[in-house]
Amino acid sequence: MHSYRLISIDISKLVRESLKSVSLSTREKERCKNFFSLGIICWLLNRKVESTVDWIKKKFFKKQSVAEGNQKALIAGLEYCESNEIFSTSFIVDQVDSVDMGKGVYAYINGSTATAWGLICAAQNAKKTLFLGSYPITPATNILQELTLYKQLDVITYQAEDEIAGVGTSIGAAFAGALAATSTSGPGIALKSEFINLAVMTELPLVVIDVQRGGPSTGLPTKTEQSDLLQVLWGRNGESPLVVLAAKTPSDCFYSAYEAARIACKYMTPVILLTDGYLANGSESWQIPKVEDLPSMITKYSVDITPENFQPYKRFTKTLARPWITPGTKNMEHCIGGLEKQDNGEVSSDGKNHHKMCNLRLQKVKNVALEIPFPDFYGKNNASILLLSWGSSFGAVRQATYNLIKKKYSVSHCHLKYLNPFFQHLDKILSAFKTILVIENNLGQLIVKIRSEFSVCTESFCEVRGRPIIVSDIEKKVKYLLKGK
């Protein structure tokens, strides 16, 4: 591991000194700071600057003084590192591999924008209006703000007076036939829980986005955490099963939001998507996918719904989903609500019927497992330790696994995107390992669910410091466990 000392550099002063011979305005000299910083980065990564100099000449060919100033600032940053040794070491070129990004159109995207775009794309493919009922809360507000920009794509956003009203309007929109979503963070999930239960009982498609932050209560609004898992799994009264997904990277927020909407519509159930502050505010380069490559949002039923065979809670055999009929459709008028129903939609307080309906709603969620793909897995299936992660810890755990394997440690990594239900053969993956290290940015929540469903030996590595988990900390924990074996 490289060690670096903390330094304080007055870049503005250094840039002004390096540009004394160049005729530039004060504002133009300030803009040259970016190239001074780029020079520092080039030194740190041992990269040559000739191609950057050529780019500067082409970019600013109309104003030679600006081109000259940017070049001088770039070289000054490089030379400053060499003469002052501000870093104890630099990376060798071969250690920083070039990445083949592939051909396509790319966008620099953060998690909140990606989530919003995923919902828009899902609604467009489903030929539905997208409705978001939300209340501003850090760090989820950016999803609401992003979606307000796309009214031309049949997107309706509603800033409600509180969290409860936000999800309530979304349930109303889902009943009216829109692809409905609501966005919030941890405290908002607590407030929305009663209405989420209503969506479970009425069996309406609803996407609930939880951008997790430090808790409990107001907690650490601007810090990241993964501590809402148990709340979204079991934080409601009664038997209230629903689907839970977790995004792993900023760009994966797009695919996760799209998948959450697809499952919600296909299985007529609420789906909770977990992201967090680290993903919402983090950015990465993302190749914009082709629409035709995304899974279909149009659900094909084995039986056509007609006025003659329509019942509000009559279920399709494969998914156990009920029909999604727009209110007011001729000869298919119906009522739904929070009271228990029979299959035909009539209110029932019969105990046997309630037991039957609870099992049906649970089985419907379990059926989602039949189409969950194999988890993201790296390493050998007979390693000494399996690192198990979910959500935004993906990058740190994958890098730690890569580093440890390179050093000949017997380690593998499995990352879970679907947290309820699990991949249907997850038990076979886990049972192949003697020790499973569950890594989470909380005090141990996924490990509770793992232990409740599987008879496997688990260890826990947890942090709640308001920051992402660090690669080196994971490596230390793994080395400690292996030393004791």
Image (cartoon, rainbow, N blue to C red):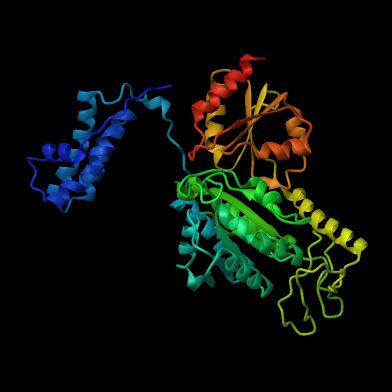
| Front residue (pair 431, 144) | 144
Residue 258: in sight, yes or no? Answer: no
Residue at (20% x, 34% y) in the render: 75
Q: Is residue 396 left or right of residue 11?
A: right
Figure quadrant of the N terminus: top left
Vertically, is 103 above or below 137? above
Residue 432 point in image, percent of width and height: 75, 27
Q: In which quarter of the image is residue 170?
A: bottom right
Q: Is residue 284 left or right of residue 75?
A: right
In this view, which residue lies farthest toward the right? 352
Residue at (70% x, 64% y) in the render: 199
In this view, which residue lies farthest toward the bottom? 330
| Front residue (pair 65, 422) | 422
Residue 353 point in image, percent of width and height: 90, 63
Vertically, is 131 above or below 108? below
Q: Is residue 42 left or right of residue 167?
A: left
Residue at (91% x, 62% y) in the render: 351
| Front residue (pair 302, 190) | 190
Vertically, is 401 above or below 280? above
In this view, which residue lies farthest toward the front? 217
Q: In which quarter of the image is residue 390?
A: top right
Q: Quadrant of residue 376?
A: top right
Figure quadrant of the C terminus: top right
How many circles with numbers are drawn on the protein? 0
Residue 97 point in image, percent of width and height: 43, 31
| Front residue (pair 179, 466) | 466
Residue 328 point in image, percent of width and height: 72, 83
Residue at (49% x, 65% y) in the render: 147
Q: In this view, does 202 lie to the left or right of 308?
A: left
Residue 459: in sight, yes or no? Answer: yes
